[in-house]
């Protein structure tokens, strides 16, 4: 499972249970690049069973109506200005996973008056809906009312981010969805027999470009004695602890035949288990014990492998290849 400062969390698309720490992660993109918004005001969580359409909780300006905040299941709010560039609460290092006590308002964690939104990287922000502490989790709405976490039922939810993308722009809302489950635990009568397949979608990369390498991963359960309904549940499981390993393959006999370029866990994983790693071909270097001179010509053939955990198994893909032109 993903870790935030050694605290284990569950991605929103990995069948999170009600009593789990759910990672509500959002990516902001402008002109094809991950971009920090200028400011974040709040994140509201509403049950979709009560609010079948987002318009039911928004006002005529498309923002969360002040009269709707009392029906929110949870509100994550700012303790400072909300300006991303200057608000120290946005650093992901501030996340501890602990609830601040009444005598300690210095902890950058989830409680009334303390920021609950954190920054993981460029354009990537998150909240953690902590079902382990339940109603002890709270936030403050725009009316200065304390909202206790009530996301305690197995249903669908929407998280509404109120964001100002640039300093001179208007506030706007971005709406995502997730679902909580009570059947995250399953029992079967035999070990899982897993078959995996992998595909590198990028076959050629232009030298000097910064490219997202995309590796599709698929798995099937080959157990004949497991009911199809349970197999379908497993299909919604996400891979964990993914790592991308890239090497430069050399034909020059004066150079090492294969030079390690990166072995990185700095990857993203989509809901359909596609692993994404951003490769900057303008800054390719070698990992010790290799030197950059061992790479030779940056153009040429590179090999890639992915490693990850699926259920109790650590899996390593076959070598996949791409060319830097």
Image: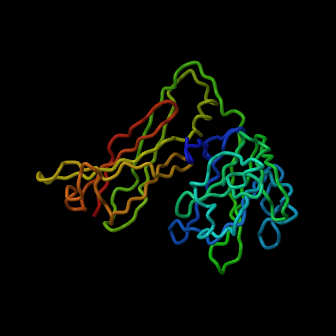
Residue 6 appears left or right of 97: left
Residue visible at 50% across and 52% down in the picture: 268
- Measured as percent of width and height from the top left, residue 83 is found at 65, 70
Residue visible at 57% across and 60% down in the picture: 124
Residue at the limit of the structure toward the bottom, as seen here: 168
Residue at the limit of the structure toward the left, as seen here: 254
In the rendered view, would you say 251 is above or below 219?
below
Query: Quadrant of the rendered structure where residue 172 is?
Result: bottom right
**The one of 309 and 116 positioned closer to us in this rendering:** 116
Query: Quadrant of the rendered structure where residue 146 is?
Result: bottom right
Query: Quadrant of the rendered structure where residue 300 is?
Result: bottom left
Residue 200 appears left or right of 35: left
Residue 316 appears left or right of 77: left
Residue at the limit of the structure toward the front, as seen here: 103
Question: Exactly how many numbered labels are in the figure?
Answer: 0
Quadrant of image for the N terminus: top right
Residue 48 appears left or right of 323: right
* Coloring basis for residues: rainbow
Residue at the limit of the structure toward the right, as seen here: 67
**The one of 260 and 56 positioned closer to us in this rendering:** 260
In the rendered view, would you say 91 is above or below 20?
below
- Measured as percent of width and height from the top left, residue 136 is found at 78, 45
Quadrant of image for the C terminus: bottom left
Residue visible at 40% across and 50% down in the picture: 264
- Measured as percent of width and height from the top left, residue 14 is found at 61, 42
């Amino acid at each position: 499972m993903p870790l935030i400062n050694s605290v284990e969390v569950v991605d929103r698309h990995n069948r999170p249970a009600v009593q789990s720490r759910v990672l509500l992660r959002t990516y902001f993109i402008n002109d094809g690049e991950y971009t920090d918004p200028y400011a974040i005001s709040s994140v509201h969580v509403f049950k979709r069973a009560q609010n079948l359409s987002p318009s039911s909780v928004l006002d005529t300006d498309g923002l969360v109506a002040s009269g709707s905040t009392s029906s929110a299941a949870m509100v994550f709010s700012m303790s400072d200005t909300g300006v991303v560039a200057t608000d120290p609460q946005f650093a992901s290092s501030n996340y501890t996973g602990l609830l601040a006590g009444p005598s300690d308002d210095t902890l950058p964690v989830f409680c009334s008056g303390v920021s609950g939104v954190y920054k993981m990287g460029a354009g990537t922000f998150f909240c953690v809906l902590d079902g382990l502490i339940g109603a002890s989790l709270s936030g403050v709405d725009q009316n200065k009312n304390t909202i206790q976490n009530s996301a305690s039922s197995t249903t669908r939810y929407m998280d509404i981010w109120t964001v100002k993308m640039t300093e001179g722009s208007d506030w706007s809302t971005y709406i995502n969805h997730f679902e909580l489950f009570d059947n995250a635990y399953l029992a079967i009568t035999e070990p899982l027999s897993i078959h995996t397949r992998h595909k590198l979608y990028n076959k050629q990369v232009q030298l000097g470009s910064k490219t997202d390498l995309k590796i599709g991963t698929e798995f099937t359960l080959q157990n004949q004695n497991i009911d199809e309904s349970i197999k379908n549940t497993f299909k919604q499981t996400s891979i964990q602890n993914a790592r991308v390993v890239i090497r430069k393959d050399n034909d020059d006999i004066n150079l090492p035949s294969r030079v390690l370029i990166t072995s990185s866990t700095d990857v993203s994983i989509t809901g359909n288990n596609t692993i994404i790693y951003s490769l900057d071909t303008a800054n390719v270097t070698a990992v010790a014990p290799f030197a950059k001179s061992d790479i030779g010509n940056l153009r040429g053939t590179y090999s890639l492998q992915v490693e990850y955990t699926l259920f109790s198994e650590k899996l390593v893909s076959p070598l996949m290849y791409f060319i830097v032109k």
